Amino acid sequence: MATAIEEKENGSPMTRDNFDEKPSTGWETGKVDDVGVSKDGMRVHPQPTADPLDPLNWSSFRKHTILAIVMYLYFMFTYITTTTVPSFPELQDQLDISSSQVNWTVAIPALGLAVGPLFWSSLADIYGRRIIFMTGTLIAFAATIGAAAAKEYGGYMAARFFQGFGASPAATVGMAVVMDLFYEHERGQKLGLWVLAIDTGLLTGPIIGGFIDLVSAAWIQWLTAILFGVLLVLEFVFMPETLYPRNYMLGRMPLGSSGEDIEKTSQFKEDPAKVELTRTTRLRVLNFRPVPGMRHPKPWDSFVRFVLTFRFPAVVVGVLAYCFTWYWFVLTTITMIPVAYVQYSPQIQGLLFLGLLVGTVFSELFASGRLSDHIVVKLAKKNGGVRLPEMR
């Protein structure tokens, strides 16, 4: 990343505020203005273009609406695994299964959540984020109806797997959407909210499920189907494509940011309206073709990258430590609640998670993303304006 921004030729220092209010286009004069610095005096990354179809140039309201939809699906990512826990006794009677078998009804959707990203990630880099989100949500919606109507253990377990598989794009593809919409110096806070969604889903699931169990165990799934149905409508109406051919566009139109990037760009650019490339909001509502103007991975590349990750022990150890100290611990605790507190009703059992929920929300809001952004800015200033991943 470049060092601190110099003032423009007229002596007026540029700020993040006037970059947001009126990004320079540059094509009227054939030259690119030196704009696009953050409020902390460092150039923004990635570099935006002057294209109104560039997701980085969309309004804050539109960006945060899309972020809210991504968080919605990530909330459902873990909600589906834990919301059925208070109904374990009813499920055992209904499906005629043992306590160990009913515990597998949490493990199987978790398996779908783990396998799904290896399938969806590369496809999202080929066909775009929106169609993958909608396809996954549709699969989860159908599977949830199947789980609600299931009368046998085998059918219920198959439906639970596809619930997880359908919700799984919220992980890797959801993070990719955040990267499409926000600058690097904004991502700590946004990813903190994104992680808050998965944590609250995990802990809210038993609370809601405990009270819906007053109606029936099946209605826990019917409510989940309603939530997926609402999400599908929101994706269709309010979530445009965010995968943007940035390298291609940076070479054909003015920058909205100053300085040099890895792309080699000249000072003379086209009017954005004259670039004949279908992109973002101009793509079809249901786009089943590769997003144009980009180099696309192979469908199996995400699996290959996953395997290659094991060459980096520091990454593997960090991921495993986080998974086992948080999600494994919480899931293990959740599945034991109906047995450990059998004297309490499902509603009281669900309320036992309120303390964890309050602590999680507090830590994510006040000691996570925004704090991370602040620390990165401080360290980057000491490092000559250069941000490094390790600063997180």
Image: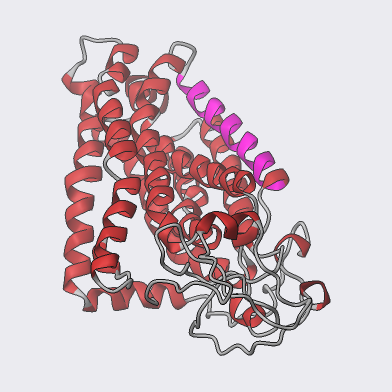
Residue at coordinates 81% horizontally, 72% vertically from top-left? 273
Can you say which quadrant of the picture contains the N terminus? bottom left
Position of 334 with respect to 248 (left or right) is left
Residue at coordinates 43% horizontally, 42% vertically from top-left? 157
Can you say which quadrant of the picture contains the C terminus? bottom left
Residue 85 occupies quadrant: top left
- Range of the magenta residues? 217-236
Q: Residue 152 placed where, x, y %?
A: 46, 34
Position of 57 with respect to 304 (left or right) is right
The residue nearer to you, when weighing 20 against 292, is 20
Residue at coordinates 62% horizontally, 69% vertically from top-left? 244
- Residue furthest to the front in view is 11
The residue nearer to you, when weighing 110 against 265, is 265
Q: What secondary structure prevails in the magenta region?
A: helix
Compared with residue 229, is residue 292 higher up or lower down, i.e. above or below?
below
Compared with residue 262, is residue 357 higher up or lower down, i.e. above or below?
above
Residue at coordinates 64% horizontally, 34% vertically from top-left? 230
